[in-house]
Image (cartoon, rainbow, N blue to C red):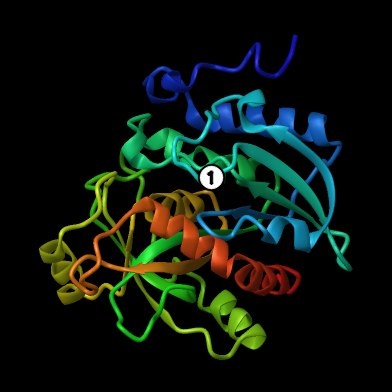
Amino acid sequence: MTAQDDAPAVGQLDDPAIDPFAVAADAARHLAARTGVERHDVALVLGSGWAGAADLLGETVAQLPATDLPGFSAPAAVGHGGHLTSVRIEGSGKHALVIGARTHYYEGRGVRAVAHGVRVAAAAGASTVVLTNGCGGLEEEWAPGTPVLISDHINLTGRSPLEGATFVDLTDLYSSRLRDLAREVDPSLPEGVYVQFPGPHYETPAEVQMARRIGGHLVGMSTALEAIAARHAGLEVLGLSLVTNAAAGISPAPLSHEEVLEAGRAAGPRISRLLAQIVRRL
C-alpha cells in the first residue's frame, strides 16, 4: 500500500469527525519514511517568484509529489509547484522541508487544507517556517521585484484556522528576531503589513485604498491564515513578500496573473539567493 492509498481525501479534512492534527502527523510519518529524514528543522512555503531558493539551499535529499502524502492536493494556481522537497542545508547539517504545494483559501477546500502544510512541517519537527508570497504593493517606491519583510498582517478572509476556544497570542507573530536576522543579510529590506483578501479576484482600487487606510502596505491572497496556524503549532514565523505589481489603483495598468508570473521570473534569481542566505542563518 502506498502513502496515497491510505491518505484521506482532501475534502475530508473539513469533516468534523476528522482530526486535522492526526492527518498532519500521519503525513509527517509518511514524509520521514519516503525521504529517510527523521526531522526537518525548518520549513519553507514558496510562493510566486521564490521557488528557485530550494536549489540554492544545499543538497536535495528527496522530492515527492505532495499528493503522495495524506491531506495534500495539487496546487490550483499556475506558477506553483506540486512537490515537497527535502534539502540538506549546506554547511549546517540541518534539513529544510520545501513545501511547493500551497492551498489557497479561494480554492474552496476549507481552512484546514490551507493550514495543512505548516501543520505537517511542525509535526515533522520544524521549529521555524518561512512563508513567502507574491503580492501587490501599496507603496509607490516599491517597484515590482522588491522583497519586503512582513511585520504584521490583517486577515480579511473572515476565517481562522483555529477551532473552538483556541486562543493564541499573535503579538509577535512575524518574529522580530527573524526579521532582524534577515536584515543582517540585507540591511535594505523594507517591511510592511500584509493584508490577506479571500480572492481569487484581484482587489478593487477602493479595496486597496481601504487596506492602506487600515494600515496595510501589501495585498495578496495567502500567508495570513498559514501564519496563524503556524504560531498555534509552535513555529517561529518569518514572512517575506515579493512585490510583483502595483496594487489596483496605484498603477493605471490593469492587473493580470501573467504580470505576476513575469515579475516573479525576473526577480527570481536575486530573491532566491537572498532567501537561501537567510535560511542558512536560521
The spot of residue 114 in percent (x, y) is 43, 40
Q: Local crowd at mark 1 within 10 Å, few (<14), some, or many (≥20)?
A: many
Residue closer to the observer: 199 or 24: 199
In the displayed structure image, the side of residue 32 where residue 3 appears, left or right? left
Q: Secondary structure at mark 1?
A: loop
Residue closer to the observer: 111 or 171: 111
Q: Residue at x 67, y 58 (%)?
A: 52
Residue 196 visible from this viewpoint? yes
In the displayed structure image, the side of residue 81 where residue 39 appears, left or right? right
How many labels, in total? 1
In the image, residue 209 sits, relative to residue 107, either above or below, namely below
Amino acid marked by disc 1: His
The spot of residue 111 in percent (x, y) is 37, 37
In the image, residue 79 sits, relative to residue 179, either above or below, namely above
In the image, residue 186 sits, relative to residue 26, either above or below, namely below
The spot of residue 282 in percent (x, y) is 70, 70
Q: Residue at x 56, y 40 (%)?
A: 101
Q: Residue at x 28, y 59 (%)?
A: 255
In the displayed structure image, the side of residue 136 where residue 144 appears, left or right? right
**Residue that carries the numbered disc 1 in the rendered image:** 80
In the displayed structure image, the side of residue 193 where residue 23 appears, left or right? right
